[in-house]
Image (cartoon, rainbow, N blue to C red):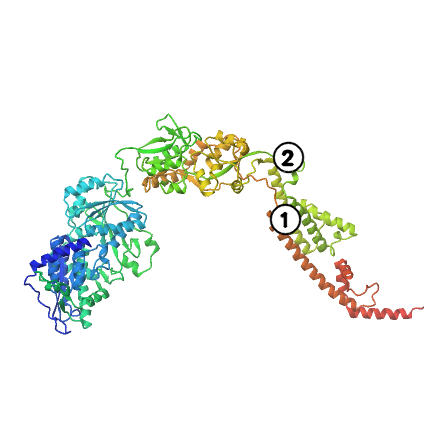
């Protein structure tokens, strides 16, 4: 980067001053084989006199002492730390870092500044020295551009994800970011913008604070943001000057009710590093939500706290700063990595940098900056380190960040703060500690509560809405269409508001339900000669000419791309209106319910079912027997009498009853359909335009009317591909009636397409027109607001409340109650019922008949076979016909009564034979 290159040039210039004749001592292992060195050096780079410096300095010293006292780590090798003070200066910090590198350190702890980390990362890349930072949280430092940068704290990528989750949880959509304008601030706010975008939120303004800015500069910036709409502020600044932001905000009255302040982990670092509750910090931050890197409660943590209290004599300290924890763990991270590095047989050695020695003719003595020969091996061991530290499990992921990132969400209230929940990349928001959720499955009862209650600025528990009107007392300019027709929805009035109507009353009732006052004034839109273009009205809202627009505004796709709409307050959609006339009855009207084809099929089906029942009943039922003439008359009478359920013949066979049951169900459906269709034909009106529905209207070439200003024209042209030349603009209900009466052949239209609410009013006044088909587009009417307007969401909630409590229906009935003739808009269709409406029913009936006939003839075949065999054993039976082998014989068998056949089959062949012999003998004794 350009800034980094300029700083590196300045650093090299300064090396000329500090490097003349000063060459650092070489550590014991240099050029000494692979034996363990007696001492290894690491550097520490931070500002001593700062919030972070005061927290990490004793922690680093204590960690080095603990490492040297532990025989299990670096046994026989002393760990030495060399500390350099950056003095809150990027330039000085860079020079101090080079001084450390010139002393042949094998790793550097720090820096606390992300800006210095960016510059020093180039130097450690060249010299192969791992740079392990316990405070630099800029997400861009994880770039592959800095392979030797090791982040031993949490990246702001996760912290900003936590902030975005909180914003989304409280349903705020817009925030203002207040941040220090350096690498730390810019990197964090960029990550916040990305995280908010994933949750459909955004940063509306970025308030930049110059590094080291004074109270006056901060007040000027806060006065500027206080004039804006959003009241949700994200503060991402340095710990040393961060409290000045809240001090200035309090003096400006910005810490009162209605404001939301969310501070990143810098504020918790300030409070924790003070050793006790800082009265100034809590006084100026009442109601603030702040984040703190989560550190699980453990014995290691309590032990470190006791040691630090004894070392710094702060007996009142009850918590550890996250910087303290990570600085302590960073020393142990280096110790474990060096231990593994030495155990693997690597030596600590340095060599001259050929790139620096290649610079000729320069007075800079750059040979003091030397390359750590095995720096890549040590870096590899750092990434592989896995141990339990004060902060928990110290282990890196594949993207070079700590595993299990988590934050405490704290609320400053009273003389201290309290934990209201936690954020982690595993459970997002929860009131359960993250370490408990990692080791056990999510508990639905616990996880249902995401955050505990918050005491907001102004000592209120009610959630702020997060925004105000930025109009400085000016009322909202509400655009209202100046209609010349259908004034029931919107009309000009001489009252205080200047307008009235159904849409106006809905808007006023919804506004009255908001929990805050809204000043507004209605501004008419249109020339009063014809209905205005509603698309132009919506365009004016998107251009901020109007602050909102109300009225009968249809919510359609192209308009939603420009503005935000509220919840629809009434249903709408396009429907067809066409002229109609009374149907003239005639002598043959009773035949119209069914088509000719349907009548033919019904007659054949009646005869077919009668024949099937006759076949099934003929052998068992005497009512279906007799002379051929009688049987034909029986079949015809039985068939058609079932139409009125007046058949007097009883069915005795199971198959006959089965077929009759199915047939009677068919007859019931046919009778009901015929009755309903005939009733409709004799009472409803008939369309005179020939339009039967949308498809027939599109396929015709007849002119179509539409309302001026409506979206119907664009829909017909763009969506239905109807030629523009066919469309006729109409302005009022009287224009509708006149055009429909004239018809397409006399300069009028064959049909009109308009929205349902208008059509309902039109039909209530003009009874000789009817709708055709159903509503073919679904939609509604709503109020339009600029994009991302929070008022649109609040008004949507208010409209739902109106709907639930019945007031919306009351307003509708007051303005749009239907009067005059019946306005039933049911689908009009005078088409006769055809076979297509009943073929499924007829198929079922046919299948029932076929199944019954198959069973019947199978039984006949079985009886015929047995009967035929029986007859062959009785050759002398008197009056017995010849062998039943011909079709005529089979028909004769079928015509026999069932009882006669069964009696014949019951006779035993032997008994019959003996009977015949006895009879012969008796006959032989008789006289001739």
- Of badges 2 and 1, the one in the foreground is 2
Q: Is residue 505 left or right of residue 723?
A: left
In percent of width and height, residue 543 lies at 32, 38
Question: Which image quarter holds the C terminus?
Answer: bottom right
Q: Give the total number of marks visible in the rendering.
A: 2
Residue 129 % position (x, y): 17, 64
Q: CA distance from mark 2 to mark 1?
A: 28 Å
* Badge 2 element: loop
Q: Quadrant of residue 900?
A: bottom right
- Vertically, is 131 above or below 482? below
Confirm or deny contact between disc 2 and disc 1 (CB under 8 A). Answer: no
- Furthest-left residue in view? 21
Q: Nearer the viewer, residue 1 or 586?
A: 1
Judge whether residue 753 can be spotted in this image.
no
How many residues crowd around disc 1 within 10 Å: few (fewer than 14), some, or many (20 or more)? some
The single residue placed furthest to the right in the displayed view is 928
Query: Is disc 1 placed on a helix, strand or loop?
Result: helix
Q: Nearer the viewer, residue 351 or 74?
A: 351
Q: Which residue is mark 2?
A: 585
Q: Reading the chain from its start, which is encountered first: label 2 or label 1?
A: 2
Is any part of residue 144 visible from this angle? Answer: yes
Q: Quadrant of residue 16?
A: bottom left
Q: Which residue position is annotated with label 1?
A: 666
Q: On screen, 31 above or below 462?
A: below
Picture layout, residue 166 above or below residue 856: above
- At 23% across and 52% down in the image, what residue appears? 187
Residue 473 position, x and y percent, is 26, 33
Crowd tier of the residue under label 2, counting other residues whose Cα lies within 10 Å: few below 14, some 14–19, many 20 or above: few
Instruction: Compare residues 8 and 28 and report the one nearer the observer.
Output: 8
The quarter of the picture where the N terminus appears is bottom left
């Amino acid at each position: 980067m350009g800034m980094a290159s300029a700083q590196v040039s300045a650093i090299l210039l300064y090396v000329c001053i500090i490097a003349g004749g000063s060459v650092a001592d070489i550590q014991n292992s240099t050029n000494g084989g692979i034996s363990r060195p007696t001492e290894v050096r690491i550097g520490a780079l931070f500002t001593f006199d700062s919030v972070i410096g005061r927290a990490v300095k004793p922690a680093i010293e204590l960690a080095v002492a603990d490492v040297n006292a532990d025989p299990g780590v670096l046994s026989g090798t002393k760990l030495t730390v060399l500390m350099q003070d950056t003095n809150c200066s990027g330039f000085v910090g860079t020079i101090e870092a080079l001084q450390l590198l010139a002393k042949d350190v094998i790793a550097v702890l720090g820096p606390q500044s992300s800006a210095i980390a960016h510059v020093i990362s180039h130097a450690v890349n060249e010299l192969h020295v791992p740079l392990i930072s316990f405070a630099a949280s800029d997400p861009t430092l994880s770039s592959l551009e800095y392979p030797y940068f090791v982040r031993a704290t949490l990246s702001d990528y996760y912290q900003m994800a936590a902030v975005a989750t909180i914003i989304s949880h409280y349903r705020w959509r817009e925030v203002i970011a207040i941040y220090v304008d350096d690498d730390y601030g810019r990197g964090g706010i960029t990550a916040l913008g990305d995280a908010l975008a994933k949750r459909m939120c955004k940063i509306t303004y970025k308030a930049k604070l110059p590094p080291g800015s004074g109270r006056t500069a901060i007040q000027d910036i806060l006065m500027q943001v206080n004039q804006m709409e959003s009241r949700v502020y994200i503060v991402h600044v340095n710990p040393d000057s961060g409290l000045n932001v809240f001090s200035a905000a309090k003096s400006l009255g910005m810490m009162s009710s209605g404001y939301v302040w969310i501070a990143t982990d810098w504020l918790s670092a300030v409070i924790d590093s003070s050793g006790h509750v800082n009265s100034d910090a809590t006084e100026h931050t009442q109601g603030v939500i702040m984040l703190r890197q989560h550190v699980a409660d453990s014995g290691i943590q309590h032990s470190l706290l006791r040691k630090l209290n004894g070392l710094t004599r702060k007996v009142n300290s009850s918590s550890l700063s996250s910087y303290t924890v990570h600085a302590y763990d960073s020393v142990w991270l280096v110790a474990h990595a060096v231990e593994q590095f030495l155990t693997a047989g690597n030596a600590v050695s340095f060599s001259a940098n050929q790139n620096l020695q290649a610079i000729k003719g320069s007075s800079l003595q750059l040979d003091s900056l030397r390359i750590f020969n095995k720096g890549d091996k040590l870096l590899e061991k750092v990434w592989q380190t896995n141990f339990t530290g004060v902060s928990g499990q110290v282990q890196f992921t594949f993207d070079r960040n700590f595993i299990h990132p988590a934050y405490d969400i704290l609320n400053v209230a009273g003389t201290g703060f309290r934990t209201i929940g936690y954020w982690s990349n595993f459970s997002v928001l929860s009131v359960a500690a993250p370490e408990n959720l990692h080791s056990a499955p999510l508990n639905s009862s616990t996880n249902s509560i995401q955050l505990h209650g918050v005491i907001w600025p102004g000592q209120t528990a009610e959630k702020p809405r997060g925004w105000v009107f930025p109009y400085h007392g000016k009322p909202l300019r509400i655009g209202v269409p100046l209609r010349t027709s259908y004034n029931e929805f919107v009309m000009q009035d001489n009252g205080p508001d200047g307008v009235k109507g159904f849409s106006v009353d809905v808007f006023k009732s919804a506004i009255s339900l908001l929990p805050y006052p809204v000043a507004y004034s209605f501004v008419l839109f249109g020339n009063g000669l014809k209905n205005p273009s509603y698309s132009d009205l919506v365009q004016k809202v998107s251009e901020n000419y109007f602050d909102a627009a109300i009225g009968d505004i249809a919510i359609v796709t192209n308009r939603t791309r420009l503005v935000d709409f509220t919840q629809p307050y009434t249903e709408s959609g396009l429907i067809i209106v066409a002229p109609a006339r009374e149907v003239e009855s005639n002598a043959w009207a009773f035949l119209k319910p069914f088509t000719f084809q349907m009548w033919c099929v019904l007659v054949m089906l009646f005869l077919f079912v009668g024949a099937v029942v006759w076949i099934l009943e003929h052998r068992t039922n005497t009512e279906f027997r007799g002379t051929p003439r009688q049987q034909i008359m029986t079949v015809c009478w039985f068939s058609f009498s079932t139409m009125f359920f007046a058949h007097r013949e009883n069915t005795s066979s199971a198959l006959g009853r089965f077929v009759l049951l199915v047939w009677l169900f068919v007859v019931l459906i046919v009778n009901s359909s015929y009755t309903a269709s005939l009733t409709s034909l004799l009472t409803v009106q008939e369309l005179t335009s020939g339009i039967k529905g949308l498809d027939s209207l599109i396929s015709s070439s007849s002119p179509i009317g539409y309302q001026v200003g409506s979206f119907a024209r664009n829909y017909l042209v763009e969506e239905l591909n109807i030629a523009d030349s066919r469309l006729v603009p109409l302005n009022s209900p009287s224009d509708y009636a006149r055009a429909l009466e004239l018809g397409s052949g006399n300069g009028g239209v064959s049909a009109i397409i308009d929205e349902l609410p208008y059509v309902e009013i039109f039909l209530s006044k003009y009874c000789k027109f009817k709708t055709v088909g159903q509503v073919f587009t679904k939609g509604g009417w709503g109020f339009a607001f600029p994009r991302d307007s929070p008022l649109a969401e609040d008004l949507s909630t208010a409209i739902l409340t109106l709907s639930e409590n019945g007031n919306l229906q009351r307003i509708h009935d007051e303005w749009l109650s239907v009067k005059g003739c019946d306005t039933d808009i049911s689908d009009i269709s005078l088409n006769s019922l055809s076979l297509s409406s009943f073929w499924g029913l007829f198929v079922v009936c046919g299948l029932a008949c076929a199944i019954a006939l198959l069973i019947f003839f199978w039984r006949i075949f079985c009886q015929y076979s047995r009967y035929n065999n029986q007859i062959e054993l009785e050759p002398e039976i008197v009056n017995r016909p010849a062998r039943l082998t011909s079709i005529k014989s089979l028909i004769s068998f079928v015509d026999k009564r069932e009882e006669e056949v069964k009696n014949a089959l019951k006779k035993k062949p032997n008994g019959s034979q003996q009977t015949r012999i006895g009879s012969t003998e008796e006959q032989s004794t008789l006289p001739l």
